[in-house]
């Protein structure tokens, strides 16, 4: 019984995110799985926390299982925190989003930015068990480089590295990413309270 993994539904349709979570959670005795088909929550929240709760509750409703959701995005100082909760909807395609961001920052000297990830864990009935926030600080590059990663990774230079997030190895990225930071705190909670 000891080595039976605790399965938690991860409220996403994004296989890349699921893989990332399971890599970070390796050896924790916890496995994240996709929600049942029909998972398509409408994110009407005004904050990352609100959106992650909406997704977690929807996954729990469909699966009747403990569910975890994250909502994350890029917040750029010079753009008053934009794109923020609209990071994935900033433009039509991933490349268009990067182009729009670089364009909006073209004449801007302040390139400070951070990735933020809010995670919410709910029980099978949708009641909140825990919530965590993870951040990763850096700045926006003047041009994109690197192919490892997704979203804004090719233009986000991580503090302490002279590289973009997309130039880091998976292991380096998981160690410093906003999602990794939030998930490690969440895993501690799960191991202490739900095992």
Image: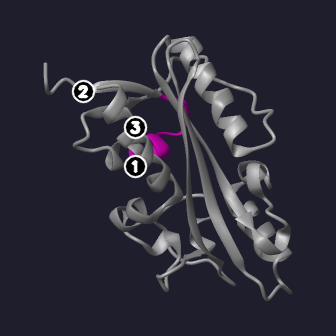
Q: Nearer the viewer, residue 15 or 183?
A: 183
Residue 184 badge: 1
Name the front one of labels 1 and 2.
1
Magenta-drawn segment: 10-20
Secondary element at tag 1: helix
- Among the two numbered marks 3 and 2 on one chain, the one whose residue lies closer to the N terminus: 2
Residue 5 badge: 2
Q: Residues within 10 Å of mark 3 (few under 14, many from 20)?
A: some
Q: Quadrant of the C terminus?
A: top left
Residue 163, position as x, y percentages in the image: 49, 81
- The reply to whether callout 1 and callout 2 are in contact (CB within 8 Å) is no
Q: Residues within 10 Å of mark 2 (few under 14, many from 20)?
A: some
User: CA–CA distance between discs 1 and 2?
Assistant: 17 Å
Q: Quadrant of residue 168?
A: bottom left
Secondary element at tag 2: loop
Along the horizontal axis of the image, is 195 left or right of 170? left
Residue at screen point 50% across, 52% down: 179
Q: Nearer the viewer, residue 96 or 54?
A: 54
- Among the two numbered marks 1 and 2 on one chain, the one whose residue lies closer to the N terminus: 2
Q: Quadrant of the N terminus?
A: top left
Residue at screen point 54% across, 30% down: 11
Secondary element at tag 3: helix
- Among the two numbered marks 3 and 1 on one chain, the one whose residue lies closer to the N terminus: 1
């Amino acid at each position: 019984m000891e080595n039976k993994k605790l399965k938690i539904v991860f409220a996403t349709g994004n296989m890349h995110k699921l893989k990332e979570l399971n890599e970070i959670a390796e050896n924790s005795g916890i496995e994240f799985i996709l929600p049942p088909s029909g998972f398509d929550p409408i994110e009407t929240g005004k904050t990352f926390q609100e959106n992650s709760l909406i997704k977690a509750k929807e996954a729990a409703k469909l699966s009747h299982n403990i569910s975890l959701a994250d909502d994350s995005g890029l917040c750029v100082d010079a753009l008053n925190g934009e794109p923020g909760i609209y990071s994935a909807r900033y433009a039509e395609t991933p490349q268009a989003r990067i182009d729009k961001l670089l364009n909006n920052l073209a004449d801007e000297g302040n390139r400070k930015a951070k990735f933020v990830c809010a995670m919410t864990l709910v029980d099978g009935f949708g009641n909140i068990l825990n919530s965590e926030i993870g951040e990763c600080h850096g700045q926006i590059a003047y041009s994109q480089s690197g192919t490892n990663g997704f979203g804004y990774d090719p233009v986000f230079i991580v503090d302490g590295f002279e590289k973009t997030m997309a130039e880091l190895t998976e292991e380096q990225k998981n160690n410093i990413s906003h999602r990794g930071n939030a998930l490690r705190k969440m895993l501690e909670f799960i191991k202490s309270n739900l095992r």
